[in-house]
Image (tube, grey):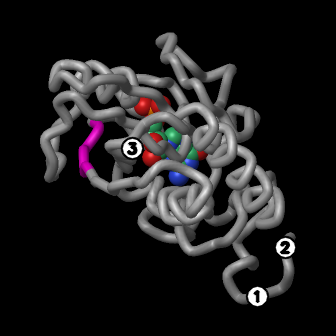
Amino acid sequence: MADGSWYDADIDHVIISEAQIREKTAELAKQVSADYAGVTDGLLLVCVLKGAVMFMADFARALGRQGPPVELDFMAISSYGQGTTSSGVVRILKDLDRDIAGRHVVVVEDIVDSGLTLSWLLRYLESRSAASVEVVALFRKPEAVKVPVPVKYVGFDIPTEFVVGYGLDFGERYRELPYVGVLKPEVYARA
Ligand code: 5GP
């Protein structure tokens, strides 16, 4: 259980705390700032809605004054799959607003599970002639990864469990939790 607010009632246990996320985000931003220090035309951060939205906001702010200038862009995709797994068959619901040809792109991801969605996305971005594409993912489930995806910056490796919070949902709920945790089994029984 977390700190007693109403929304904590459905959480069985916290996997990564709010403080750990804050610290790791600052660390990742420091690494990315250092690696892209020479990029004068700025970095294009690409967020895939909706799971990565919290991380995108905090990561962009953590880059802040230390990093190169950044622009933010968003894609919405639907990944066909059953229940809580993805199949890698992807449909674009909202495409990028900007032309990414010649740009240095950093994909800001919430979590790499099977890797199928990210693998599709990387092929898509590369087909649009970006100068470079790297990925920063706050979470990865190493034991679940089915396709090798080059994730240069990883926040936390976590167990192969379904998690919610900090942007990650179950049935569109729990995205607002400031930490990442596992739901109590009865929550699934209720759904
Ligand atoms: P993948 O294609 O790597 O299997 O899954 C990618 C997407 O599935 C992630 O970007 C995320 O939105 C969603 N996802 C994967 N694992 C979890 C999880 O444990 N909890 C939630 N809420 N979503 C997840």
Crowding near the residue tagged with mark 1, few <14, some 14–19, many ≥20 C-alpha atoms within 10 Å: few
x, y (%) of residue 137? 57, 39
Mark 1 CB in 8 Å range of ligand 1? no
Name the residue type under label 1.
Ser
Mark 3 lies on residue: 43
Residue 2 - label = 2
x, y (%) of residue 166? 60, 63
Tell me the residue at 68%/53% (across/down): 25
Q: Is residue 183 left or right of residue 166?
A: right
Tell me the residue at 70%/58% (across/down): 180
Q: What separation in Å lies between label 3 and label 1 (alpha carbons)?
A: 38 Å
Q: What separation in Å lies between label 2 and label 1 (alpha carbons)?
A: 8 Å
Residue 28 can be seen, yes or no: yes
Q: Between 186 and 10, which is closer to the camera in this rendering?
A: 10
Pointers 2 and 3 in contact (C-beta within 8 Å): no
Q: What separation in Å lies between label 2 and label 3 (alpha carbons)?
A: 36 Å
Residue 176 - label = none
Mark 1 lies on residue: 5
Residue 168 can be seen, yes or no: no
Q: Is residue 6 left or right of residue 146?
A: right
State the image quarter where residue 39 is shown.
top left
Pointers 2 and 1 in contact (C-beta within 8 Å): yes
Pair 2/3: label in front:
3
Q: Is residue 45 left or right of residue 20?
A: left
Q: Between 103 and 181, which is closer to the camera in this rendering?
A: 103
Secondary structure under tag 3 reads strand
> Bounds of the magenta span?
75-79
